[in-house]
Image: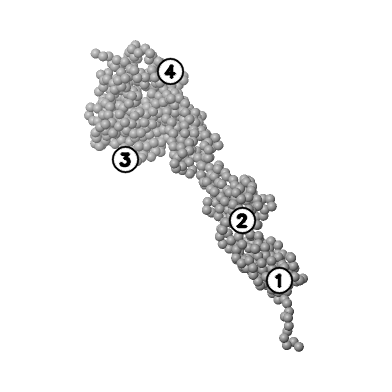
Amino acid sequence: MKLQKTPLRRVMSFLTLCLPLMLVMGFYSGQAQAICNATASGTVASMFEDDDGDLDLQGTCVGEGDADMDWNEFAPVTWSTEDFPAPYRTTTSSAKGWFFAGKEDDEVSNSDTAFAGGVKQDDNCPKLKNGKAPNKDDLSRVYLSSKTVDGHTLLNLAWARIPQNSDTASAHVGFEFKKGSMPCDDDPTLTKREVGDVLFVYDFEGGNEPVVLTLRRWIDENYLTDEKQNGLGDNPVAFWTDMASPCDIDSNSPPCWGDAVDLTALGFAEADVNDVGSTVFDELAPNGPEDLGSVQFGEAGIDLTAAGVFPQNTCQSFGRAFAVSRSSGNSGQAQMKDLVGPGNFTLANCGTVIVRKQTVPDEDPNSTDFTFSTSVMTNSGAVPNFTLKDDGVKTIFDVLPDSGLTVTETPSAGYDLTGIDCTAGNVVPTAASLATGTVTFDIGSSDILDCTYTNTARSAIAVVKDVVNACEDDDGEFKLYLDTDLKATGGDGASFAEDSLSPGTYEVSEQAGASTALTSYDTYITCNGTTTNAASASVSLAAGDDKDCTITNIRRPTIQVTKLVFDSSKWDLLVDDGGDGFDYEATDKGNGESTGEVVIMTIDSGVGENTLYGPVVLGEEAANSDANTTLDGVNGYAPTWDCNNSLGPVRGTGESFTIDQLRPGEEVQCTVTNAAPVAGACSPGSN
């Protein structure tokens, strides 16, 4: 007959059979305790009142130390039906650095989710059924919370059950945490167990008996050689204590739950159930605050790091959890009863860093690489530099808790870092600099830093000078500006380009250079099809824009009229620019005198090289010293007009002459010759 395993017998058996693993109990002996008030040297206080069987914060641990947290501090909470309807709702919350999750369960109902008859704790992927659980096993909800304190991952468990028929009703609840997500073959509600999965068993024998909280780890047939299981790897605590019979139920063989470890006896956990005859107030209850009667509520706190579940500097993570009531505390005989869950609950001693990349405008296709570096450490060591394209995501799992960590983006050519948004995770950076591209942060267990880096593409503009002169090479010189910066100087063909501009509005303009007057030109600035008739234009550049601008200067034609007359008579010479009335007059001109060059400004038709000016009307009158611009006659003289314009008639007679069109840059010279009136050779009948 095999002796019942006591903690001491298991330890001695283990040390005898596997001497290299002596460090296991050494690891256990001096670690911090997950108690509300840790008084022993080197211990860590959770400050969570997990030791009084009450949800209200009293401010004092049972050991008389200060406390600043209890379950009702998470209130108010909202129970969600997004994933499951009532009575299977879920809720989450956070307070004072603790993450909280709650899971509701049906009560006193034949449709409640339960385990089929005879299912034991070791059964992987057991059968489920609908059925009403016995009164003492009928759970109404469970609560979980976790936090990292001084490098130790802490876990709190709580359960509530329906009102009890007896103050001596025992409670046996298993809390199972799973690493994997592979659904069971027969019932996808549950997931398959993996090596290292965790089972906490909460045993309360009723009345005023103390609670015993034990830990088990899932092992397989490789338990002796697998460093994950035998305590020789990153985790110095083996998942079993008896080489010959490593299962908690001695008669079973792996895969199974390994030998139980009494966490309360070792000082890594504490627990309590509300006292007989007492009522505790639950502000988190799904249907509003609720009073819970005698032995209806139980809680526990565990230091997962001290217990070896989460060794320091090594990452472990569990993503699914459920609770199950058991018929008794005897693992070999206990049948599984009521099931609460499963549900998502991230239990980890490491964090996650997520870096996302967005560009403005959205790249299509995504081609630009943005380089990142980080100081975070994982189980595998330092994280190498990585690159992301637009819409890319880098997720770094198993980030070891630390402070002052950084993620930095190295600037990419053609882009400015214009935004860093880290609101998607629960970690708020201590600093985020657009100037350096660096996010600085602290991260703990289960924390998520989720940052989106937004880069805005720089813009480009190219400006070229086009001088239109139909008659000759133009000698105009122009200064080209972007805002107030002189970018180029020259004539036809002068240009400049900028390809690294921040999005915004810019002024493209020109000024006259040496020996050039802008009044001699019609000026147009055209940018991507939009034309401005001026020497300056505002250009809006959106992110990634690449605009081409042309500053076109069309040389205005000129005309000069010279007077030819063979006597001393004086004349007023007039020019009508546009055919709408004379607007220029040179008065009192005699033989050989002229109007000087008159710049023609009226455009008749066409654009660019096809621009034509006109019409131009030339006129003369006998000098009369008046200021009006109407023709008052030529006193019998016979004017003849001769011009060298390239289009239309070049000769005419009379007091006025019209040139219909002039080409850009034409310098038209005209003469108006006046023949004096001659008397008749005779006057018949005069004598």
Expressed as whole percent of the image width and height from the top left, the position of residue 321 reads 34, 31
Q: Which residue is mark 1?
A: 674
Could you say which disc has been placed on residue 85 in the image? 3
Q: Nearer the viewer, residue 588 or 158?
A: 588
Tag 4 or tag 3, which sits nearer the N-term?
4
Q: Residues within 10 Å of mark 2 (few under 14, many from 20)?
A: many
Label total for image? 4
- Label 3, label 2: how far apart the Cα atoms are: 82 Å
Query: As drawn, which residue projects farthest toward the top?
Result: 16
From the image, state whether disc 3 or disc 2 is nearer to you: 2
Tell me: 358 left or right of 256: right
Tag 2 or tag 1, which sits nearer the N-term?
2
Q: Which residue is mark 2?
A: 469
The residue drawn where x is 71% and y is 71% is 674
Q: Nearer the viewer, residue 115 or 486?
A: 486
From the image, state whether disc 1 or disc 2 is nearer to you: 1
Q: Which residue is mark 4?
A: 30
- Label 3, label 4: how far apart the Cα atoms are: 46 Å
Q: Is residue 596 visible?
A: yes
* Quadrant of image for the N terminus: top left
Expressed as whole percent of the image width and height from the top left, the position of residue 218 reads 32, 23
Query: As drawn, which residue projects farthest toward the front?
Result: 681
For mark 2, give the secondary structure. Answer: loop
